[in-house]
Image (cartoon, grey):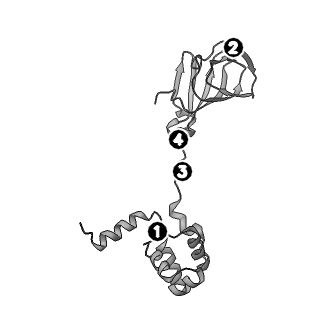
Amino acid sequence: MILSQNQNDEDKQKKIPYHFGEKLRQVREKKGYTLKVVAQKAGVSESLVSQIERNHVSPAIDTLLSLADVLDINLEFLFEEYRKVRPVTIIHAEERPTIREDEIIYEELANPKDSKNDVSFESYMLKIPANTHTHRGSYGHMGQEFGIILKGRAKLIYEGKEYILEEGDSVSYSAAVPHTVENIGDCELNAIWVLSPAQRFTGK
């Protein structure tokens, strides 16, 4: 099967991930430089500059830097359309997804779906009534946990040992062994708890 010249050109374009050519040509022409002048100053062939401007080849980084220097182009200008869009997710206080474990309330602070598997995490505003303790870690599970006590007094029971946590205290540990958090104060215990990787506790 013989491909037409147009088909060959289209295939070449698909293999080139970044198209700087139009910008380089526009700046060159605006400055009144010929292909030959730019090529000589950049230390490359005139043919290569022409191919780059027509997006027929993707320049090596050192060639691109040389051309940008000759044309006095800010790299930010060349790469501006290739900036990765990084989403920002906001969960308003009154809209937090909530799950209950008996009398204990877990208010979701970040959706696990928004993070990648290798760096995933889930976090909660934990509300534990007096004389009550969590159950979800009773048998242990994979990952790490981090918590900080915002209000009240807690007891972490971890691998058979007890650790008292006062307001403002923080704690971190491997979640692989049995662990529970108990409210040993007189008022509701409020804490922020983070688990990584995400366990998808809310089932969403």
Picture layout, residue 7 above or below residue 185: below
User: 90 and 41: which one is in front?
Assistant: 41
**Sequence-earlier tag: 4 or 1:** 1
Asked whether the beta carbons under mark 1 and mark 2 sit within 8 Å of each other, the answer is: no
Q: Secondary structure at mark 3?
A: loop
Q: Residue 160, labelled with which disc?
A: 2
Q: Is residue 20 above or below residue 165?
A: below
Q: Residue furthest left?
A: 1
Crowd around label 2: few <14 · some 14–19 · many ≥20 (10 Å): few
Q: In this figure, which residue is indicated by the disc labeled 4?
A: 116
Distance between the alpha carbons at the discs numbered 2 and 4 = 33 Å
The amino acid type, in three-letter code, at marker 2 is Gly
Q: Disc 3 designates what residue?
A: 86
Q: Which residue is mark 1?
A: 19
Residue 143, quarter of the rendered image:
top right
Q: Earlier in the sequence, mark 2 or mark 4?
A: 4
Q: Please report the residue visible at 57 percent of the width from the left and 39 percent of the height from the top.
A: 119
- Dot 3 or dot 1: first in sequence order is 1
Q: Amino acid at mark 1?
A: His
Contact? badges 3 and 4 (CB < 8 Å):
no
Of residue 9 and residue 204, the one placed in the foreground of this image is: 9
Q: Secondary structure at mark 1?
A: loop
Tell whether label 3 touches label 2 (CB within 8 Å). Answer: no
- The reply to whether the C-beta atoms of the residues labelled 3 and 1 are less than 8 Å apart is no
Q: CA distance from mark 1 to mark 2?
A: 61 Å
